[in-house]
């Protein structure tokens, strides 16, 4: 009997027989009567215990061997060095080696591919109390290989660590996986395996083909919302949470065949699938960790079903078929819904009745051409539904014939009302001024062109409307207030015109009205007067009231022009004449106004050449200390003498120069000429302090003003204190970063900065606080009324108070009487200019004045 312990190597013969010899010796001692009775009893008990232990050890060994050999997988026991201590029967069968051939050999005998230190990770894992698992390839005695998955665990025997390794043969599983993979590739159903997070684990070729993607990578995060739109069986959009795979993950139950729609956005193709999902559980898991989806393409089947009709309703497309011989018309449910008729048409006459008269003829001709010549039909037709709503259709069709020579025309009918409505909205937007909602320039020109091309409508009138003082409001209060004013003005004009004409915003603050007299020759004039009356009430902006009037020019076609542009130009000329004469009035066009317009064009042409032709010159009006009578400065004033136009006053050409932009070049010339003259006076020893030069707001917008001034000063060797720049309030309104920077640069040069004609505009006091301005000029508009006019007196007092409060210098313009001088002195205004002292003088005349200063009592 063997008493070798489990996992131990076979004992030597002597050690194996030792327990038997001890038992025999104890038995003999028990029978020896020479020994004391008590000792014999103890020896007998020891014998019995030794026999029982030997019997238990043998039983344990038998149980171990029976259990060890009963394991169906190869099991080997190793020591820490990797030496095989035991091998079960399954191992002997698998490796085709006996126990005697294997025991005592290194494990490399069974797996020759193991690295040298292969036991190190095994023992480290077992030391942590874990099981070491690895897939390797083992070798049989005949040299053949087979894959195994080895699970190793540790245990202690006779004080040393041993390893039990169970090898599971994977050959059958690998073969099954191979057969499974082959099956997936040949099956005509799509198969996808995804984990609980939706990540794709496996997909077959059929799935890639059915879904219409180019490669497996496109499905890694299927379905991506940016790529796929999901629909339920009824064609309604659903979310990812409504897909069968998500229901299976939530419930842990398989879903039977479910129809879903997948719209692939890049391909613009809709596919219908019948999907079945099956959950997969990990060992011991309660929730699925994977889901298998099996699906097939049922798009063709769905096209033939009622469900396909519901899906097509999303695109508002229906089907129709007309049997020509029987005049029988078949319409799908969606086609009937699109037509919107209480009784669906049963023949072609009923369908034609849904259309307008012109489109009935077009569709009839197309049907005839399709039936007789097999020409395809593709028309956009207009009609009306039973409920009165407009109907826009796109009808497509082709003729089909069978062996019975029966002709049928089949096709689709699509509701395109929304598209047509969108097109009309775009058309209206393209014709509409976005600010006022009126027609825009292109729209009114188009309407005028169409009507003037029609002899029956060519007799029309145009009213050209320009808002008086709009620029003052827009510049003074900002563009937002200007926009509000334009909207209100447009509303008043439209209300005044009513149904007597078309109203358009022609540009800026200009409006156009086109009306047909139609037997009432005085209608245009009556409409013009209604517009003027509508402007009588004040406009309220930001809690303040403003009176803005309109100037209107009227031109009649065809007498005043037979083309739109000519008629508008003549109405524009009449408007300018009205503005020049009275404002807030209307004026009919006359041929003499054409001459005025030509004069303006001639003026602008000559003005553009004036600098190059040397036609400008400067005069200088003294600025006088009104108490002493001494000249403290002078203002440079431009004059223009043209050989064709004669002597031109500044108020006749400065406005044109600002409009055309020529003022930038002219202003640069004035600045250079004035500085040149100051340099000459200084070189001659005259004590003139400085010369003031007017600067247009255009020079801020179209020129580097600070740079130009710096260059001119350097050219003539002048300090900045020799120059004063006068700005209108319009320049202050151009409140851009560039303007603020220019003011700062000019101030740094030592140049005196003054606001000209202060009080005529709507500039906020905020500009005086923020900008580096040093002086104000009191406008002649207010000075001419003092001291008699109480309003002018009040304005002058207010401006003087502002100047004192802000520490600004103040110069009065247009001082023409002694009474005005006395009033201004009492008001605290020290410096003035005007005809009381001197008009604009030539440089030589001013030199004489400087050389012979007048006494304080002299008024010049």
Image (spheres, rainbow, N blue to C red):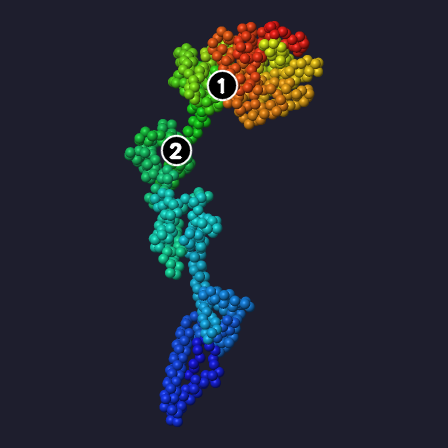
Q: Give the image quarter of residue 47.
A: bottom left
Residue 120 numbered tag: none
Taking the spot 50% from the left edge, 71% from the top edge, the residue there is: 80
The mark total stands at 2
Q: Nearer the viewer, residue 511 or 166?
A: 166
Q: Which x, y percent locates residue 570?
A: 50, 14
Secondary structure beneath disc 1? loop
Query: Label 2: how many residues lie within 10 Å, few (<14), some (14-19) or many (20+)?
Result: few
Q: Give the image quarter of residue 379.
A: top left
Q: Which x, y percent locates residue 113?
A: 53, 68
Quadrant in the picture for the N terminus = bottom left
Could you tell which of marks 2 and 1 lies nearer the N-terminus? 2
Distance in Å between CA atoms under marks 2 and 1: 49 Å
Q: Is residue 223 left or right of residue 105?
A: left
Secondary structure beneath disc 2? helix
Q: Which x, y percent locates residue 378?
A: 41, 35
Q: Is residue 6 above or below residue 509?
A: below
Residue 762 numbered tag: 1
Disc nearest the viewer among 2 and 1: 1
Taking the spot 37% from the left edge, 30% from the top edge, the residue there is: 382
Taking the spot 61% from the left edge, 9% from the top edge, the residue there is: 629
Quadrant in the picture for the C terminus = top right
Q: Is residue 51 above or below residue 175?
A: below
Taking the spot 36% from the left edge, 43% from the top edge, the residue there is: 235
Regarding residue 715, the answer to whether it shows in the image is yes
Regarding residue 95, the answer to whether it shows in the image is no
Q: Nearer the viewer, residue 467 or 414?
A: 467
Q: Nearer the viewer, residue 761 or 777?
A: 777
Residue 418 numbered tag: 2
Q: Nearer the viewer, residue 229 or 615?
A: 615
Query: Label 1: how many residues lie within 10 Å, few (<14), some (14-19) or many (20+)?
Result: some
């Amino acid at each position: 009997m063997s008493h070798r312990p489990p996992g131990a190597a076979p004992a030597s013969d002597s050690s194996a027989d030792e327990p038997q010899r001890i038992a025999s010796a104890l038995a003999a001692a028990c029978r020896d009567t020479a020994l004391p009775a008590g000792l014999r009893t103890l020896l007998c008990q020891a014998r019995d215990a030794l026999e029982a232990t030997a019997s238990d050890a043998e039983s344990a060994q038998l149980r171990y061997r029976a259990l060890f050999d009963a394991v169906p997988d190869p099991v080997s026991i190793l020591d820490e060095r990797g030496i095989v201590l035991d091998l079960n029967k399954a191992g002997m069968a698998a490796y085709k080696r006996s126990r005697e051939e294997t025991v005592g050999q290194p494990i490399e005998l069974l797996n020759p591919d193991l690295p040298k230190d292969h036991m190190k990770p095994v023992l480290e894992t077992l030391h942590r109390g874990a099981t070491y698992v690895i897939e390797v390839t083992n070798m049989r005695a005949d040299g053949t290989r087979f894959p195994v998955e080895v699970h190793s665990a540790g245990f202690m025997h006779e004080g040393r660590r041993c390893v039990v390794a169970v090898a599971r043969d994977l050959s059958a599983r690998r073969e099954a996986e191979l057969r499974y993979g082959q099956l997936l590739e040949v099956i005509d159903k799509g198969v996808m395996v995804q984990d609980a997070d939706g990540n794709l684990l496996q997909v077959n070729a059929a799935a890639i083909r059915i879904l219409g993607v180019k490669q497996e990578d496109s499905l890694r995060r299927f379905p991506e919302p940016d790529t796929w739109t999901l629909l339920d069986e009824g064609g309604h959009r659903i979310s990812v949470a409504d897909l069968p795979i998500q229901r299976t993950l939530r419930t842990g139950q398989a879903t039977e065949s479910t129809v879903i729609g997948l719209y692939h956005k890049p391909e613009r193709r809709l596919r219908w699938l019948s999907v079945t999902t099956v959950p997969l559980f990990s060992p011991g898991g309660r929730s699925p960790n994977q889901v298998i989806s099996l699906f097939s393409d049922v798009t063709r089947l769905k096209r033939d079903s009622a469900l396909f009709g519901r899906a097509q309703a999303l695109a508002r497309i229906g089907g129709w078929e007309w049997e020509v011989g029987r005049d029988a018309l078949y319409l799908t449910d969606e086609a009937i819904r699109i037509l919107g008729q209480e009784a669906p048409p049963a023949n072609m006459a009923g369908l034609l009745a849904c259309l307008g008269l012109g489109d009935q003829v077009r569709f009839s001709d197309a049907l005839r051409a399709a039936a007789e010549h097999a020409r395809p039909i593709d028309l956009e037709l207009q009609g009306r539904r039973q409920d009165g709503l407009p109907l826009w259709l796109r009808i497509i069709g082709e003729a089909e014939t069978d062996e019975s020579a029966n002709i049928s025309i089949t096709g689709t009918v699509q509701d395109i009302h929304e598209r047509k409505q969108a097109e009309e909205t775009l058309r209206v937007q393209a014709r509409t001024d976005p600010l006022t909602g009126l027609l825009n320039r292109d729209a009114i020109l188009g309407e005028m062109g169409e009507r003037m091309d029609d002899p029956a409508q060519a007799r029309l009138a145009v009213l050209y409307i320009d808002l008086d003082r709009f620029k003052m409001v827009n510049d003074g209060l900002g563009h937002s207030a200007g926009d509000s004013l334009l909207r209100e003005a447009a509303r008043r004009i439209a209300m005044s015109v009513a149904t007597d004409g078309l109203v358009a915003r022609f540009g800026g603050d200009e409006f156009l009205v086109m009306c047909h007299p139609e037997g009432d020759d005085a209608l245009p004039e009556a409409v013009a007067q209604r517009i003027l009356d509508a402007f009588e009430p004040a406009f309220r902006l930001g809690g303040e009231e403003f009176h803005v009037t309109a100037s209107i020019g009227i031109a009649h076609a065809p007498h005043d022009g037979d083309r739109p542009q000519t008629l508008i130009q003549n109405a524009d000329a009449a408007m300018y004449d009205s503005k020049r004469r009275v404002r807030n009035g209307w004026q009919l066009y006359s041929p003499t106004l054409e001459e005025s317009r030509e004069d303006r064009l001639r003026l602008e042409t000559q003005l553009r050449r004036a600098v190059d032709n040397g036609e400008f010159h400067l005069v200088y009006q003294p600025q006088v200390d009104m108490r002493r009578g001494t000249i403290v400065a002078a203002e440079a004033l431009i004059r223009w003498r043209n050989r064709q136009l004669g002597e031109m006053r500044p108020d006749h050409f400065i406005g044109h120069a600002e409009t055309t932009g020529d003022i930038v070049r002219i202003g640069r010339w004035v600045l250079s000429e004035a500085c040149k003259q100051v340099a000459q006076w200084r070189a001659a020893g005259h004590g003139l302090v400085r010369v003031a030069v007017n600067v247009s707001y255009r020079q801020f917008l179209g020129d580097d003003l600070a740079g130009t001034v710096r260059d001119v000063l350097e050219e003539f060797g002048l300090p900045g204190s020799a120059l004063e720049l006068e700005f209108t309030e319009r320049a202050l309104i151009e409140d851009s970063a560039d303007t603020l920077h220019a003011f700062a640069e000019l101030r740094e040069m030592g140049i005196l900065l003054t606001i000209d004609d202060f009080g005529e505009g709507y500039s906020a006091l905020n500009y005086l606080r923020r900008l580096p301005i040093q002086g104000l000029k009191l406008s002649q508009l207010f000075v001419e009324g003092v001291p008699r006019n109480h309003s002018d007196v009040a304005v002058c007092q207010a401006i003087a108070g502002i100047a004192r409060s802000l520490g600004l210098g103040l110069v009065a313009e247009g001082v023409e009487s002694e009474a005005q001088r006395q009033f201004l002195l009492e008001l605290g205004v020290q410096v003035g200019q005007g005809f009381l002292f001197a008009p604009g003088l030539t440089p030589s005349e001013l030199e004489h004045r400087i050389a012979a200063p007048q006494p304080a009592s002299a008024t010049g």
